Structure formats: structure tokens, C-alpha cells
Image (cartoon, helix red, strand yellow):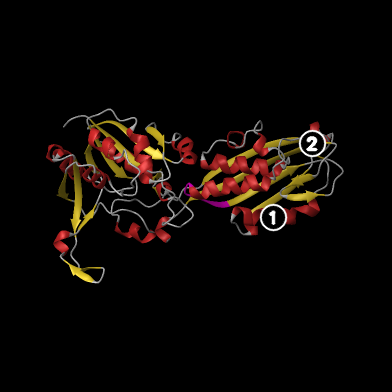
Amino acid sequence: MPKTTLILLAAGSSSRFNQGVKKQWLRINHKPLWQFVADNFAQSTLFSDIIITASSDDISFMKNYASYTFVEGGTSRQLSLKNALKLVNTEYVLVSDIARACINTNFLDKILSKHSLGDCIVPYLPVNDTIVYNGNTINRENVKRIQTPQLSLSSALKKALQTQEEFTDESSAIVASGGSREFILGEEDAHKITYPSDLNQIPCLEVPSSDTLSGNGFDVHAFDTKGDMWLGGVLIDSDYGFLAHSDGDVAIHALIDALLGAAGMGDIGMMFPDNDDAYKGIDSKELLSQVVSKIYNFGFIIVNVDITIAAQKPRIGKYKQKMRETLAPLLNLEMARVNIKATTTEKLGFIGRGEGVGVIANANLKYFDWTKI
């Protein structure tokens, strides 16, 4: 078999899956789906490189999981593929979708063994039902359900995609540009995940791990003689605020770090740099909303949070319930799962001297359980 590069397409938004989690981040035991699929392909020794296309938001997080070659995808499947093809210098390229999760070794070998039969080797499934098109019954023998992976001559595929016309698979593009394709019988088990119900037809997937993932966050802010004081998303009656790049809500900042820590997503400074003018004076509740959206998109569910606010001043006991009421909907939690505690430092340290506030936060996450959809 000539040298071959594998391209796995994982840059989609999962809009048709419509579960608040991107399907490429569904957990198979502990692995996200994209890694599960890539690792299975990587067991073969036939690929010179494995390239994964992903959205810009996903790539930095993906790099925490595996050391494949990642390429930023485009606004369509075809644009993502074109971006990846820029890195391909092997004679052949095998293209598959992350959503087609169960490609077994025999099926893969069958596709690769046919490389010399055409510019593109295309697996398909026959149609067994009666087919009516525009009111007319047509011969179902002439209808094929096209699958991936598809094996293409790299030069033929690159040439075929030098067009603005959109194609839904590689073989259609190659044929439209004058190339040839060879059909081979596909496999029912190579079903594609498009809708939640498709998960019932994927036999190789393990259920998500039931482990609880914990993270903690710590932050401090000094007082400022001007500005409003926001704490836990609530406006505090005070003659002073916090010295900070954003609105200085030290409780939300610690909470964000706890959530990111539990998810393995770095820290607040990586996501919202304090030298970026886009975040100057920003409402920290907006930052929290963005983080929570990412948490859910990346396949996690927030279980509960616990926040301890250490302040000699101001006295915040009367604000704790309002903080729970404010933070719970932002976290998609019931109020009972958002705990707020307040303490002093017995006049010790900078907090005890009334120079600022410190907060410790803890958060627990679980994986989204796709078996309960």
C-alpha cells in the first residue's frame, strides 16, 4: 500500500445533534469521541500522519488529550478538508468523519486494498426500500447510500476541490472534475452519528465513565477607592470597589478557575487575558456564561459548586442568598447545588486589615450521559 495520510473531520457545530454538547465531545469511557476514533485508526501502521480538523475553540483543548496534527476547520466540511489537504504530501489520503465511529480493521483493509481501482474508493450500502423521487418510483438498484472513509488519490482530490461548488463527499467532487471512483460494499456498523437516535445503532461505543471530576479555584482582589463592588454576581452596597481589569468579581473569578480546573481546561488567565482590552470592565457574569457554555459543549455536566468568601469587610451575610439565586441559572443548576459561605480571617493578613477579599471555590463535574438521551 502506498503512503497514506488520514484526515478526520471534526470541525462541525453539531447543530443537528442539538443536545448542548458537541457530538465530537461525547465521552466513550473517559475519551472524547474524536480521540476514541483517532486512537482506533492509529492502531493501524498504514498512516504516515493523522490530521484532525477542528474549530478554533476546540483545538487548544484537544491538544491536552493527544498529539495528533490539528488543523483549524472552515465553515463547511469542504473548506475544512481543503485546509487539511494543505498538509498532505502522501500519494493517497483517507478521509473520514469523526461521527462515523465504528470502522473496524477488516473494513479499513478492504478500502485500502482497492487503491489502484480508481481515483476514489467509495464504500456504499444498497437501498432495500422502495424509492420515490419527485412522485416517481425509481429503480432502487440505481441508488446507493454513500459512506466514509473514502480513499482518494491526493492529487485528484486536491484538483477536485479547486472550485467554489460544494460537494457532500470526496467522490462527488472527484467525479465532477473528471476523475474516476470505484464503489465497494460498505458496512452497516459504520453508521454515522447525526441525531441522538443514531447512538442506538453504534455497537462499539462504551458508556461514559461515571467518575466525578473536581477542581478548585482561588483568587484575590484588592480594594479600589472608586467603582462598584460586584461579588458573586451581586452588587454590594459599598463605598469602594475592586482593583481589577474586569469588574473585579473575585468570587466568580475563583469559580471560573474551579470549573476550568475540573474540566482540565486551564485557567481564567488563559481564556480571558487581563491584557486584552476586550475584557476591560466586563461583567464577570458574562465571562462565567461563556465558560459554562464551553463546559457543556465539551461534554461535561456541572454537579455542584461551593464558594468560600473570606472578607473582613464588607459584611456579606445578607447577600449570600442573592448570590445563590444569581449564580444558579448561570450554571444550569438548582440553587441547592450552589453553596456560598462567608468567613473572616480574624483580622489577620491583608484580608484582616481590610485591604481586599479572597475566595476559594470548588466545582464538581460529570460527563454528559448520552445513554439517557
Mark 1: give few (<14), some (14-19) or many (20+) Cα within 10 Å: some
Q: Is residue 192 magenta?
A: no
In the structure shown, which secondary structural element does the residue marked by tag 1 occupy?
A: helix
233, 95: nearer the viewer: 95
Q: Position of residue 154 (x, y in %)?
A: 24, 34
Taking the image as shown, residue 146 lies to the left or right of residue 273, namely left
Q: Position of residue 358 (x, y in %)?
A: 73, 38
Q: What numbered label is drawn on residue 292?
A: none
In the structure shown, which secondary structural element does the residue marked by tag 2 occupy?
A: strand
Q: Name the kind of residue labelled 1 in the image.
A: Thr
Q: Position of residue 202 (x, y in %)?
A: 30, 55
Taking the image as shown, residue 217 lies to the left or right of residue 3, namely right
Mark 2: give few (<14), some (14-19) or many (20+) Cα within 10 Å: many
Query: Which residue is situated farthest in the bottom direction here?
Result: 135
96, 27: nearer the viewer: 96
- For image coordinates 70% across by 50% down, the residue present is 340
**Residue at mark 2:** 356
Q: Name the kind of residue labelled 2 in the image.
A: Gly
Task: Reply above or below: 370 against 351.
Answer: below
The part of the image, by quadrant, that contains residue 373 is: bottom left
315, 89: nearer the viewer: 89
**Residue at mark 1:** 326
In magenta, the rendered stretch is 298-303
Taking the image as shown, residue 115 lies to the left or right of residue 371, namely left
Residue 44 appears in the figure: no
Q: Is residue 301 magenta?
A: yes
- For image coordinates 83% across by 44% down, the residue present is 314
The part of the image, by quadrant, that contains residue 313 is: top right
The part of the image, by quadrant, that contains residue 273 is: top right
- Dot placed on the residue nearer the N-terminal end, 2 or 1: 1
